[in-house]
Image (spheres, helix red, strand yellow):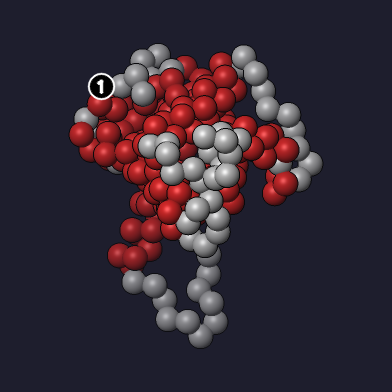
Amino acid sequence: MADLPGAPPLPAGAVSSAARGAKREHILEAAIRVFALHGYHGARVSDIAAEAGIAYGLVYHYFKNKEEILRTIFDERWNAFLRVVEQVTQGPGTAAEKLHALAGLVLYAYRRRPDWVKVLVFEIRRSSRFSEPEQIRAVGRLFRSVECVLRNGQEAGELRDDIDPQVACLAYVGALETMITSQVLGVMQLPEEPDASDDRTVRAVVELFLGGLRAGRAQ
């Protein structure tokens, strides 16, 4: 791409760094597609190179091995997802509004990126890397975010305060995880909605969950 008129040319190092970052991202995206299609154990580095349209040896300029590729996919994609989750949970809105937004993020992740979700559900969770402390802490951030929403809702008088927010968090995240897994397995697919901002499926899930949590219900 040519420089904009009047703009100073980018330093050679910056161009090289940007190009390297783009190539690395291209390899990761190719790896996600290959892992989703063949599974982690059935995939080879040569398959990833072929999917990316690059020479086999070039992959090793960016990653030491296939395991590092899988770990990087989890680290970068999961952390990007968590940043969006934390924007929702730490932003304005009622507990119900935040739970609705979180359900939309989780339930429609498969529709937006089925290959990535399939790799997360089937390949990353089965990897020994998933049990390492760093990965466990990363997953724990999702649970802490949901728990914070529930706890704040209790303190604001929106939700019942006689239910442990950690227990409620496990129930909420567990329900969403089951629905995601059912989509990946093909057991059940969520209906297509013409307007994702007013999704009936998401609203139904949140209403079912909040039915027993809203303040003012018979104890």
Residue 135 location in percent, x, y? Answer: 27, 35
Which residue: 67% across, 35% down?
Answer: 204
Q: In which quarter of the image is residue 139?
A: top left
Which residue: 40% across, 14% down?
Answer: 42
Residue 199 location in percent, x, y? Answer: 71, 41
Give 95 or 73, whichever is nearer the viewer.
Answer: 95
Q: Is residue 42 visible?
A: yes
Where is 12 relative to 23, above or below? below
Q: What residue type is labelled 1?
A: Ser
Give 88 or 96, whichever is nearer the viewer.
Answer: 96
Viewed as shown, does residue 168 lie left or right of 108? Answer: left
Q: Quadrant of residue 165?
A: top left
Where is 127 relative to 201, above or below? above
Residue 22 location in percent, x, y? Answer: 43, 50
Q: Crowding near pointer 1: few (<14 within 10 Å), some, many (20+)?
A: few
Which residue is disc 1 drawn over?
128
Direction right: furthest residue: 194
Q: Is residue 95 visible?
A: no
Give 174 or 6, whichever is nearer the viewer.
Answer: 174
Which residue: 51% across, 46% down?
Answer: 159
Residue 119 location in percent, x, y? Answer: 45, 26
